[in-house]
Image: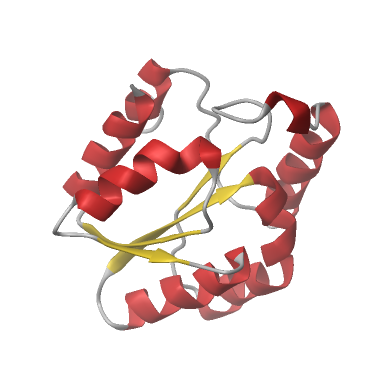
Amino acid sequence: MWPEAIHRELAAAQIRLVGYVPDAGHKRLIELCQADKSMRAVVLSTEEEGIGLAAGAWLGGARSVLLMQSSGVGNVINALGTIKECRFPLVTIVTMRGEVASNVRQRPGRDERDRTVRTTDALGDERDRVVGDHDACCSRK
């Protein structure tokens, strides 16, 4: 399944710090990261805290990843400017609400997906869309 494939890739990339706001779409990946003794999983109260966590990790010589739901992208819009200005790397894995392990009643439809895509496009961020388990480990090499 895709959480196991992503976890293997994170471990291979020597990711040591995993910031996340609890999310059903990332539930299994979060569990894997919490169980991995080489990673420290840090629960956040807002996605924006994850930007600071990633900056601090980079300054301290560690690699990090930020896990968030698509609705969280809007919560980090101001902090994302810091990444451009300070030139530190940020790897995020964003689940699209209503697509992966989401509560059916919360399906946002195309509007939220479009806002998320437009936000990352406006910042000039690189993005790969992963749709299935195969894509999770083979999207970008």
Relative height, residue 119 to residue 141 (above, below): below
Measuring 68% from the left and 28% from the top, which residue is drawn there?
98
Image coords of residue 118 (percent x, y): 78, 44
Q: Say which quadrant the N terminus sits in.
A: top left
Q: Quadrant of residue 54?
A: bottom left
Specify the quadrant of the image occupied by residue 75.
bottom right
In this view, 20 is above or below 113: below
Measured from the top left, where is residue 138 in percent x and y? 34, 25
Residue 42 as seen in the image, left or right of residue 34? right
Viewer-proximal residue among 84 and 137: 137
Q: Is residue 123 left or right of residue 129?
A: right
**Residue in the image at 41% along x and 27% along y:** 139
Residue 62 or residue 41, whichever sits in front: 41
Pick the residue in front: 22 or 56.
22
Side of 128 where 7 appears, left or right = left
Q: Residue furthest right?
A: 111
Residue 17: x percent and y percent?
31, 65
Residue 126 in picture, x, y percent from top left: 55, 46
Q: Is residue 17 above or below residue 110?
A: below
Q: Name the colour scheme.
A: secondary structure
Number of marks in the rendered image: 0
Q: Quadrant of the C terminus?
A: top left
Tell me if residue 141 can be seen: no
Give the residue drawn at x 60%, y 78%: 85
Residue 86 seen in the figure: yes
